[in-house]
């Protein structure tokens, strides 16, 4: 009785291919093992760090307790009195053009609306502003009253 050579999945491959596959499999196993070792070492290091932090915090609470300080009885933090105050201001400008420039640069949504006006509408607004200016004349300038709204907290 003759026995035929056993056929394996790799028997149809050349010797070089089998060697390359074997090296690749062994390399994969080595890398997986190395990854497992690194994972184990890092997780242990992280666990030690967390444990040390917890121990430190427990020691700090014990110190507070020993000194008679109740962490739950600490004073409220933050602001207890919050209010707004109106502060009068004066805008000093040389002329209507100066005022329009000031408003177009600093007046938030109004400034945005002014900057988006077409030239004829800008000129009409400027003319209305200029017609109201004489009542605010002070020497060689104009002083327009304003109001600043300030948040105050303590």
Image (cartoon, rainbow, N blue to C red):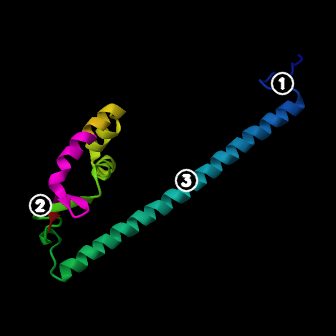
Question: Residue at the location (73% across, 44% down)?
Answer: 27
The local crowd at label 2, few if under 14, some if 14 to 19, many if 20 or more residues have their Cα within 10 Å, is: few
Q: Measured from the top left, where is residue 5 in percent x and y?
A: 86, 22
State yes or no: residue 102 in magenta.
no
* Mark with earlier residue (1, 3): 1
Q: Which residues are magenta?
A: 126-151
Q: Measured from the top left, where is residue 40 in percent x and y?
A: 54, 55
Horizontal arrangement in the rendering, residue 25 relative to residue 114 (left or right): right
Question: Residue at the location (20% across, 44% down)?
Answer: 131
* Mark with earlier residue (2, 1): 1
Q: Give the residue number, with chain letter if any, for mark 3.
A: 39
Q: Give the residue number, with chain letter if any, for mark 2.
A: 85
* Image quadrant containing the C terminus: bottom left
Tell me: residue 108, above or below residue 51. above
Q: Is residue 15 visible?
A: yes
What whole-number distance in Å separates the C-alpha atoms at marks 2 and 3? 59 Å
Instruction: Tell me the element at label 3.
Output: helix
Question: Residue at the location (19% across, 83% down)?
Answer: 67
Q: Which dot marks residue 55? A: none
The quarter of the picture where residue 62 lies is bottom left
Q: Measured from the top left, where is residue 81 in percent x and y?
A: 10, 64
Front of the two marks 1 and 3: 3
Tell me: residue 115, above or below residue 95. above
Q: Is residue 145 visible?
A: no
């Amino acid at each position: 009785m003759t026995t035929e050579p056993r056929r394996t999945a790799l028997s149809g491959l050349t010797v070089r291919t089998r060697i390359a596959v074997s090296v690749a499999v062994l390399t994969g196993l080595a890398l997986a093992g190395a990854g497992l070792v690194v994972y184990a070492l890092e997780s242990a290091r992280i666990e030690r760090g967390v444990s040390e932090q917890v121990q430190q915090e427990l020691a700090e609470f014990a110190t507070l307790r020993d000194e008679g300080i109740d962490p739950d009885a600490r004073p409220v933090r933050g602001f207890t009195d919050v209010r707004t105050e109106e502060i009068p201001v004066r805008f000093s400008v040389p002329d209507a053009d100066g005022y329009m420039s000031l408003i177009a640069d600093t007046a938030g949504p109004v400034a945005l609306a002014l900057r988006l006006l077409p030239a004829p509408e800008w000129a009409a607004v400027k003319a209305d502003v200029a017609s109201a200016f004489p009542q605010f004349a002070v020497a060689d300038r104009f002083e327009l009253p304003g109001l600043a709204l300030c948040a105050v907290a303590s």
